[in-house]
Amino acid sequence: MNDKWKLYHPSTRTGKLCYQYCSEQSALPIRDILADHNKGNKSEPNYETATYNWCVNCNQPSVRAAVNDGLTHILFITKYTGTVREYRDRYFIVGYYAIGWTDQLEERVAIRAKKLCFAPIEKAYEITPERWKRINTSGKTLELTNLRYATQRIREPLLEEIINHIYKGNALDSFLHEAAYLKSQYNPFDSIPKGKIFIINVGANTASPLQSPAFSDGTFEFTPIPEYTQIDSGHILSLKDLRQFNAPEKPFIDLFPEGMIDPIKNVHNDPEFLTFTYGDNIEQKRNLQKLQTGDFLFFLARLVPYSGGIFQHKRAYFALIGFLEIAERLDDPTSPLFTSPAFIRSAHVIRYLTDPASLSGFAIYKGSTNSRRFKYAVRFDREFVEYVPLLKADGSLWDWSRTTELGIIGSNTRTVRMFIDPSTEIGRGQAKRFWLHIWKTQKWEKMISTDKRSC
């Protein structure tokens, strides 16, 4: 699905400025995800896919010129409008892409980074009047009054100075966590999506001593399964490496009393909701091979109400916790993309770096910028199943008489498969009820973007 990306070979070590609107709802100088400037819900620069100009058309003349002239870097400049008052209304270079790949999308050129770095505002590169004179050696914008259309090229040694400055303060993890959290607050779709809907069961189950906690306000945290590769490779994640979704500044382990969990226990964080990847053995789970670009892979997890350090196991329930809108599939570890920023956070790439034989039969799916980790759990119970309705593989209704509701749901979702095909008459009705229920649960409006195609 990603064979269009072509390796990029720059000819001159030069960077080019590109402007981004800054969020008003974050301390980070992150892109304007929630349309604070009434310019649409910004998806560019897209840290999640490590792309620029791929999700939507953005700064096309600048991107095309950078590629045509063989430049090495895109430098993102912004007027800070975030929550840290002392830095407001000042200009900063907040991040950069080192261009690694290009893609031709109809009338536009997209780029993908082989390396990207973004810094918090206190560690970003401020554009002072003195620095602006060094940057703007031949431009017409002489004063720091409006850099919205800044496109200056920056060469050595100033380029190296800027890159090193941002690299030292790199906080890409924080940007990814913040982006996922902010994106969970708005609907990326302005109509019912047409992609097929697949559902797969993921995360900690009854065999694990640590469950996925659900809270009284409907929010939750996802607990991944243990990683079988229990060696200190420098790649494998442990519980202490995870952060909370609902409080991205806090470690995951802070949720639990001391002694409840082993913080250094390795985890298989799959799916991961920062760069939106999921990997699995497609030789064993053949239905995954049917996933096409634009289809949806929904994740079903067992959640347990949690309060005061106590899990209420008897009240456990299943819930949909997020989805990938499939954009790419990668199953070739020899591809340069495999260890690129777009895929390196996949649990299967991490496992592969420790145990290369582990990738046999596996594929890694990459979600589009429309992919979401939900803020609120979508209860997957009998009422929901019958409302849609979700049917068995043979087209019949679920039989609820054999065992408990949890048991029936577990049995019917044990094997990943396609549950809804909107291209059929019955599927269109199912998809509409399915999506509208999710939108209602997430408290999403139909669409809050003023311009969906805005960058």
Image (spheres, rainbow, N blue to C red):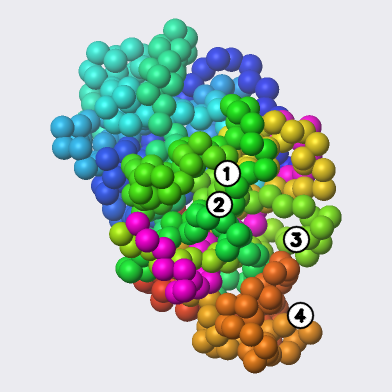
Q: Nearer the viewer, residue 259 or 341?
A: 259
Q: Which residues are magenta?
A: 309-338
Q: Which residue is mark 2?
A: 224
Mark 1 and mark 4: Cα distance apart in space: 32 Å
Which one is earlier in the sequence, the residue at label 2 or at label 4?
2
Which one is earlier in the sequence, the residue at label 1 or at label 2?
2
Q: Nearer the viewer, residue 16 or 265?
A: 265
Query: Label 3 is placed on what type of residue?
Result: Leu
Which one is earlier in the sequence, the residue at label 2 or at label 3?
2
Mark 2 and mark 3: Cα distance apart in space: 20 Å
- Determine contact: label 1, label 2, CB under 8 Å: yes
Q: Which residue is mark 1?
A: 267
Q: Nearer the viewer, residue 249 or 82?
A: 249
Residue 423 counted in the magenta span: no
Residue pictured at 31% horizontal, 24% vertical: 123
Between label 3 and label 1, give the one nearer the viewer: 1
Regarding mark 4 in the picture, which secondary structure is present there?
loop
- Residue 9 visible in rendering: yes
Which one is earlier in the sequence, the residue at label 4 or at label 3?
3
- Determine contact: label 2, label 3, CB under 8 Å: no
Q: Nearer the viewer, residue 38 or 303?
A: 303
Between label 2 and label 4, give the one nearer the viewer: 2
Q: Which residue is mark 3?
A: 288
